[in-house]
Image (spheres, rainbow, N blue to C red):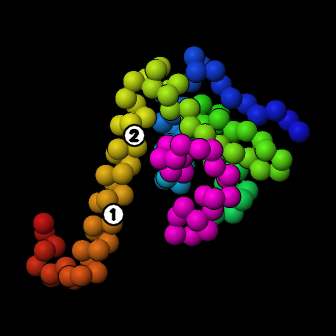
């Protein structure tokens, strides 16, 4: 088995972080990893969105997060367990990860409210110009 690539914290760039977290699935995965204190198996995230994500696609998402320096992957038998490198990243770029995850959570709350509001009360016909 090939060893996993984990960039040193000095080699992590803002551009790589922003690129990795520009995908809605990856940012959702990363936000979930941040919220937990222990490592997680990749397959736990197969239902992080409304549609089930195939294992091969999940592997690509985790590879992008790992190569950007956001997570550390560790093989345990046939499973891959992932932990956040947020503490390391925060020392290099203070507040960056917190700001991105906060923005992601605000966006999710807005989508939830918009979805709920639309179901409870249909939009009026006169509200087109607003």
Q: As drawn, is 112 to the left or to the right of 93?
A: left
> How far across and down, in percent of the image, does residue 18 sit?
48, 36
Specify whether residue 39 is painted magenta. yes
Specify whether residue 76 is painted magenta. no
Quarter of the C terminus within the rendering: bottom left
Query: Label 2, on which residue?
Result: 100
Q: Which residues are magenta?
A: 29-52
Query: Label 1, on which residue?
Result: 111
Q: Residues within 10 Å of mark 1 (few under 14, many from 20)?
A: few
Quarter of the N terminus within the rendering: top right
Q: Does 43 sit above or below residue 94?
A: below
First in residue order: circle 2 vs circle 1: 2
Q: Quadrant of residue 94?
A: top left
Confirm whether residue 30 shows in the render: no
Q: Residue at x 47, y 19 (%)?
A: 92
Q: Residue at x 68, y 58 (%)?
A: 43
Confirm whether residue 1 shows in the render: yes
């Amino acid at each position: 088995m090939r060893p996993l690539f984990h960039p040193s914290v000095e080699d992590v760039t803002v551009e790589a972080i922003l690129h990795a977290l520009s995908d809605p699935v990856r940012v959702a995965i990363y936000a979930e990893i941040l919220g937990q204190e222990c490592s997680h198996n990749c397959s736990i995230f197969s239902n992080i969105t409304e549609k089930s994500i195939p294992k091969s696609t999940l592997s690509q998402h985790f590879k992008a997060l790992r190569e950007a320096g956001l997570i550390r992957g560790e093989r345990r038998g046939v499973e891959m367990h992932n932990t956040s490198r947020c503490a390391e990243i925060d020392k290099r770029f203070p507040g960056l990860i917190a700001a991105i995850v906060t923005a992601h959570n605000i966006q999710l709350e807005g989508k939830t409210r918009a979805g709920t509001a639309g179901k409870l009360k249909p939009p009026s016909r006169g509200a087109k110009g607003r």
